[in-house]
Amino acid sequence: MTAVETKSQIQPDLTPRKRKSLLPEIITVAALALVFIFLAPALLNLMGQGSRVNQLGRFLALAIAALGIDLIWGYTGMLSLGHGIFFALGGYALAMHLQLQLPAGQIPDFFNLYGVTELPLFWQPFYSLPFTVAAIFIIPTVVAAILGYLVFRNRIRGVYFSILTQAALIVFFNFFNGQQKLINGTNGLKTDTAQFFGALVSDPRNQTVFFVLSVVFLALGYAFCRWLTSGRLGRLLVAIRDDEPRVRFSGYDPTWYKVFVFAVSAGLAGIAGALYTVQSGIITPKAMDIAFSIEMVIWVAVGGRATLVGAALGALIVNFAKTLLSEQYPEFWLFFQGALFLLVVTVLPSGFLGLLSAENVLWLRSRLGLPPKLSTYPSLEEDLEVQHERKNPRN
Amino acid sequence: MLANLLEGLFNGISIGAVLLLAALGLAIVFGLMGVINMAHGELIMLGAYTTFVVQNVFKGLGSPWSDFYILFALIAAFIVTALVGVLLERTVIRFLYGRPLETLLATWGVSLILQQFIRSVSGQFVIGVGLFCALFFGAIAIISRRADYERIQAWAMAILLPLSAAIAFFSSKIAGDAFKLAVTKPWFGTQGVDVTAPKWLRGGLSLGTSTLPYTRLFIIALTIVCLLGIYWFLNKTVWGLRIRSVTQNRGMSACLGIPTQKVDAITFAIGSGLAGVAGVAVALLGSVSSNTGQAYIVDTFMVVVIGGVGKLVGSIMAAGAIGILSYVIGSNAFGPLFSGSPFMTSVVEFFATASMAKVVVFALIVVFLQFRPAGLFPQKGRTVEA
């Protein structure tokens, strides 16, 4: 009897602990989005850097892909070197729809070059805009889910997973690059000259829409990833990263979580690819270059892995550094990029945001003459007894 | 039909031989350290460029020498790439053991640097980089003798780095202005360079209707020699024994007094050296440019994945299978077999290019991994990491 009583006495307090309010974060993200939509283009135009608006829009689209990479690599610890596939699939889906904006009975110009007179079957559904919009993220998601299932089912992981994704990338590249008759091979699909809602895609009005869409999707993608990683799922993903066998021994099947997160990140890459394509005016198989897919990883690494803000920030920083440097010193960019890979991995493993880590903040506070702010165990701070003892140290 | 089959087999084996030569070093290093070296392709490229340089040097020496430059190129390529490999291991990879994914990214960085290095290396470039290294590391070496080095280290770095960089930059600029094209001209440039096979490797052995090119035969022979050499080294020498024991169990080997660091360095040197030898073979096959290495990395990785890390035999079989499959599918060697049904013919013809053959081979690899996830010859053990 007593045992039961003691048990009921030590029942943990089940009243929910006061949760950190999400409101400040939501307001910050919304404010940042508004700044990007309204202030940034105006400011850049004022500075006479109008062409940079387009670049900013493209890099914001890339930041969406970086969020996906962060989910899969930063949180779950799987290094995918094949996200170019999903990026390109999204881009091609939208580009195919835009190519089909023609008078009835015509087929896109490039088909004539190869003597194709009839539209290939798989182009047909892309006449419809709703289908295309869905395809942009559903096709990459499904492809990733199938590939992921086949790989994760056999507990293939670590370096093997990276190599397999890279091989898959080569395969897709070869397919898109070699099939002139189906999707114009090396030349890729142009979107610049297509009609979209009564104007050219390259029309400033349309471009503004795409810019705004990039910002909105980045914000939405951030919110979605934040939601995914903040709860149980997020903790499970980190657990898979840190010790997968142990997760399995605890009764979870990591396979499905890994398939899920791989598919989600592929969907994000697809959206990024579509937005990037319409803003750069063309999609070619070069989007499935080995180098480009690894570059995506370095954006996340530079910003700070396992921090979503870091991923987006890293994409913007690295890409702007790339355009600025390769405009000035084209031959030095590769040296710089190589050094970046080496430095980030060896010296700065947690990226730029890692500089804001607890230790560095402490160091800064001590330099500024502020008292150190220590909280080793957050639950201790809320304990009334501890607070009482702190106030009356003599007891 | 039989002649076709034999020719297909030969071509497949010769593709496989290059793959195997390229993958051999990778497999040994991966087996020992669990490290995937993304710069392996660039080491192959360095080997190919070394061949080019040796060829030009021997051309200057005249007739009896220039016929046998290829033998010296093999040695030179092995030494050059082995040295680069040791440098890479000692300065980068050593610090990343136990973090295979980070190693992969770091070595990718190295591969980018090597590619650009080949494109832009020139007299001016060498002066700049050499001067910077001499000034910076020389100064650090002098300062590190001081007793209060720990205290002033950060300051010394902060001053020395920009200072030596500035001196190096301006002196290379001055050199460039003074000697003009003599030092600013890139040695190799972005264009590809060509290695011509020596006289005794031109032509081919005619067998019935088909001919077997001597270069291909040479590469197959080279692969066999390398395989025998590695087999002998791993199984009959002291260091081979140590390498095998560290591959099996690093911790236990270290406890028993095997210098694992030295073993790592030696293995990496040998793996890189083999990449250099593969580079000689690659140079014989076609034009060499700074992108050459990229074409080989994925295929060689596949060989390692399929072969498993336990035995050399795995790599041999994997390379042979991939080579033969790619050739057979790519050249449509079995096309006549399907001539009965038009549907099968069109399917087979759809995949009958080198790049579409890769698509099929990859699909087969994924299917294969469903049955043997750890490759043909997995490392046996009782670790949790299945």
Image (cartoon, coloured by chain):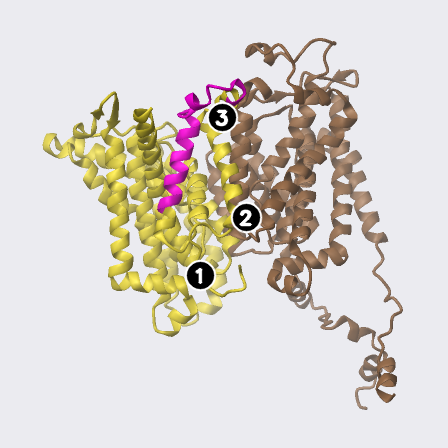
**Residue B257 versus residue A167 in the image, above or below:** below
Q: Name the foreground residue: B34 vs A153.
A: A153
Q: What's the distance in space between the residues labelled 3 and 1, CA to CA?
A: 37 Å
Query: Identity of the amino acid at label 3?
Result: Phe
Q: Which chain is yellow?
A: B
Q: Name the foreground residue: B130 vs A343.
A: A343
Chain to which mark 1 belongs:
B
Q: Is residue A8 left or right of residue A230?
A: right
Chain to which mark 3 belongs:
B
Residue A391 badge = none
Query: Identity of the amino acid at label 2?
Result: Phe
Residue stretch rendered in magenta on the structure: B316-344
Instruction: Give residue A305's position: percent from left, percent from top.
Output: 63, 52
Which residue is depicted at the point 29% across and 28% down?
B194
Q: Which residue is mark 3?
A: B351
Q: Which chain is brown?
A: A
**Residue A195 versus residue A322 in the image, above or below:** above
Which residue is depicted at the point 46% across and 69% down?
B150
Helix or strand or loop: what does disc 2 sit on?
helix
Residue count near mark 1 (Cα–Cα under 10 Å), binned few <14, some 14–19, many ≥20: few
Which residue is depicted at the point 65% across and 66% down?
A367
Instruction: Give residue B159's position: percent from left, percent from top.
Output: 47, 55
Instruction: Give residue A12's position: percent from left, percent from top.
Output: 84, 75
Residue A161 badge = 2
